[in-house]
Image (tube, rainbow, N blue to C red):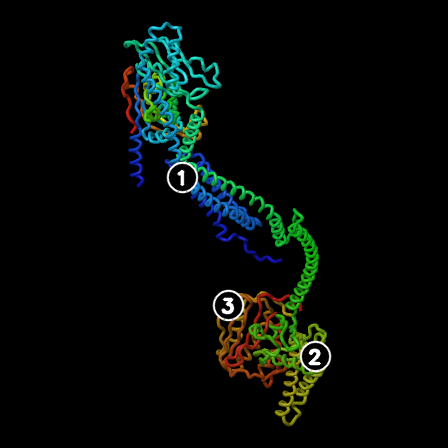
Amino acid sequence: MNNEVRPQHNLALPYRLLPFTFVVLLIIIAVAMWPSDNQYGSKFLSWLNISLLIAMAVSVFFVSLRKLTIDAAKAGSVLRAKLVAAMVVMVLVPAVILQVTANQVIEKGMDVWFDVRVDTLLDKAMALSQGFYARISADMDASMVQVAQDAELVNEITVVPIGSMVTSRHLSKLVQQYSWDKAELFDANERVIAAAQMAFEGQSLSELRSLPISDAGRLSVLLGRHTSEHEIRENGEYVVGYLPIYDQRRQIALLRAQVRLPDNVASSARSIETDYRSYRELERHRQGIKELFMQTLMMTTIFITGVAGLFALFFAKRLTTPVEDLAQALKQVESGEFDGFVPVRSDDELGSLAVSFNSMTERLKFNMETLRQTQDELTGALVSSRQRQYVLENLLAKLQSGVILLDDDGSIRLMNLSCKQLFALQDAEKRKTSILDFSEVHLKPVLEFYQTMQTQALESLQTEMVITYGLQSFKVLARGSRLGEKGSGLFTGWLLVFDDVTQLAEAQKHQAWSEVAQRLAHEIKNPLTPIKLSTERVQRRFRNQVDNVEVFDTCTSAVINQVERLQRLLADFSNLATLPKPKCTQVKISSLIKDMSELYSAYHNLTFEGLPEGEVYCDADQIRQVLINLIDNALATKKPVRVYVVVDKLGSSFFVQDEGAGIDENTAQHMFEPYFSTKKDGSGLGLAIAQRISEEHGGHLQLVSASSPTRFCMFLPHVFPQSSEEA
Amino acid sequence: MFFSFAASAAEELKESEQIHTHIEAGVVYCDVQALNHEAYFLNVLGAGSAMTVYWQFKVRKISEYWIDQAVVTVRLGRQVIPDLVTKRWLMRDLSGGVVRYTAEIEEAMMFLSEMNHAAVVDVSVLDANSKYWLEAKLYSYEGTLKEDGWWTSLINWGEKMGSVAINLNNDVVGESVVGVTDEQ
């Protein structure tokens, strides 16, 4: 399974910064739109836009933060973020361009709408209307001044009784004279005393009804001078004039005259006024109107961008959900789970991809199951093989025989511990990679054994060889076999097995000598006693009869002595052959040394050094025999002799050292063999017996130093080996 | 720069804050002028547009450790409707219903920008041992706004024309004296 860590699909830094840049942009726009104190019109739209911008900025900020932290780990989030960003940018860019263009158009449009010529034209039209109205009022005022000087009217009011038509006729004249529509006279109690009216088409009866006097009329009475006012009634606009009429400073009546403004002129004037008002209002709110357009456009832009963002989120989610499912399932497959199923959400390419993916995972699952079964089988086989290898290695390690497995070219493929110990290869282990590296002197027999097999193309070979390493020599039984056949494709090489047969050979030799000794003792011992007894009898009987007694004594004594020597020799043979089993007890080393010191007290060149504590488990008589043999041999050199004991945790070592001339190599090599002696009268069995006694005690006897000072060592272990005891 | 701006703003505010109170016959009256609105009113009225204003007087009881408590709120409305053709301006008191024409635009402007002798609160409503604060705000609308509903305050938050502390202990009931200390 591939556990390689895949790189995370993180958004690049520009993409990460994009939403936050957008947020900053929104905040800058909001600050720029902050309404000033001198802003015209309502600030409601400004605050609404600012609120929308801030809400959008906060939403974008938190959504972006969530997408970049929590949802970033989700599969498909990067693609989704890119899609949303792209769609928002696609909407935002044209919207901003549209906003800027619209602003410019509005700016230019304002200049066109509020042209100076229009302004001047409206001013003139308004002045014209005002002039018309002022003219009518002025005419009314002028007519009132003239009527005030009309003495005939005063006379008629005071003289003519009320109810006659004289006054009314006079009023009719005035109406016609000043083009009034109506003229009325009121007494002090505001009752109509005379009236005249211009008839015109479409006149209704209600217009004949007299209206009450207005505040302006009362003001005129109060002030005592004429006044005029404009009245807007249901049927039209009027200019109404009031004139108090006095007779010698006494007010006798109040004249009210009215002129109806032409409907078409009044309508046009009012229309001009309305247009003028509207235009001025628009002009006054020019900045506000511009801001209204811009704010509305801005709001639309914000709304469109927001909707586009939401739509982009929705669309991107729909688009990336299948991708997310696929990525999630791929992660499961990557982690080794093949149960992931991608739902097929549509019939398009993504749906087809999901179907293909599900089919692929099914096949992968089947293949993985098969692979797992094969792996289990292989693992079982491998475990079995390893177990076999373990058993073989343990077997080789425990095997007392030395084993070397060689390739065809002599390279060492395997060499067990016994082999290394046998040939003392522990230190040279790393250098021995081939049998051809066995270049040391003591290993030459091994190399020659291999070369013999190889050069003669032998299938197997068995031979005995003597390995001499230092002062030690041991016999080795070497057996070699060829393994495998060339061309079979399997392993081919050589298997060499070496066994140390030194002890076996020694035992065989001892056995042979014992048998010889027993046969000799048996064959020779029997006639020796009668020979000796007969010789002693002859000596006693015929000593007085011989001529030369001295020669007779010499001859008979020689026979007797030689017979006795032969008997001793036979006793040694017998001892060698039938050495008794040691009867071991705990013996103090100090007592052993004391005994030997007392025994050899007459020898001044013999020194016993130290009395070490400790005990040895041995047959004291046999050990004394060994020590006596060693000391006798040492004393024979006539040189100073040292005897000392070294006790360690393994056992006790008894050293006998002399300062003689030393021992030559041939002697050192054969001195422990029976019947090897450098003395004329020696049997050559002393050291052989001593060595056998040492070995019977589980120890050994060896020549530690052949050159002067010559030193022998008898080692006795603390623990007596059971096998030896039983043997 | 900020301090110079703040200083000039304070001076401007001081000039515009022509607010005084006095107690007369057990009633707290207020005189207030919006001098900084005169040009605006002249501009609007001269252009033939109607103008409606509402003067709002709010008396709040000063709390030491809590938000000041509103005691009373009074709103008084005035309206001017121009007639450009006849060069007259109709002045209407929306609170009392009095209507009057004027041929002087300055008079119409002052009708809107000044509120003199406005009865705000009866002294009996106030606690003599407490401190009160009177705040005047001006809500101005172009056009003939006939109804002063709650929604109007949503789009127009008014402009503070000044505020003064009402000290009842120093006022002599029944005399028209200025018994207040300017806030600034």
Viewer-side label of 1, 3: 1
Image quadrant in which the C terminus of chain A is located: bottom right
Q: Position of residue A704 (x, y in %)?
A: 54, 76
Viewer-side label of 1, 2: 1
Quarter assignment of residue A487: bottom right
Pick the front one: A724 or A545: A724
Q: How many marks?
A: 3
Do the residues bearing badges 2 and 3 touch, measured as CB atoms within 8 Å? no
Location of mark 1 (residue): A115
Quarter assignment of residue B106: top left
Location of mark 2 (residue): A461
Question: Relative to A669, is A207 above or below?
Answer: above
Q: Amino acid at mark 3?
A: Pro
Query: Chain ID for label 3?
Result: A
Image quadrant in which the N terminus of chain A is located: bottom right
Q: Position of residue B28 (x, y in %)?
A: 33, 19
Name the element at disc 2.
Answer: strand
Location of mark 3 (residue): A612
Quarter assignment of residue B20: top left
Query: Chain ID for label 2?
Result: A
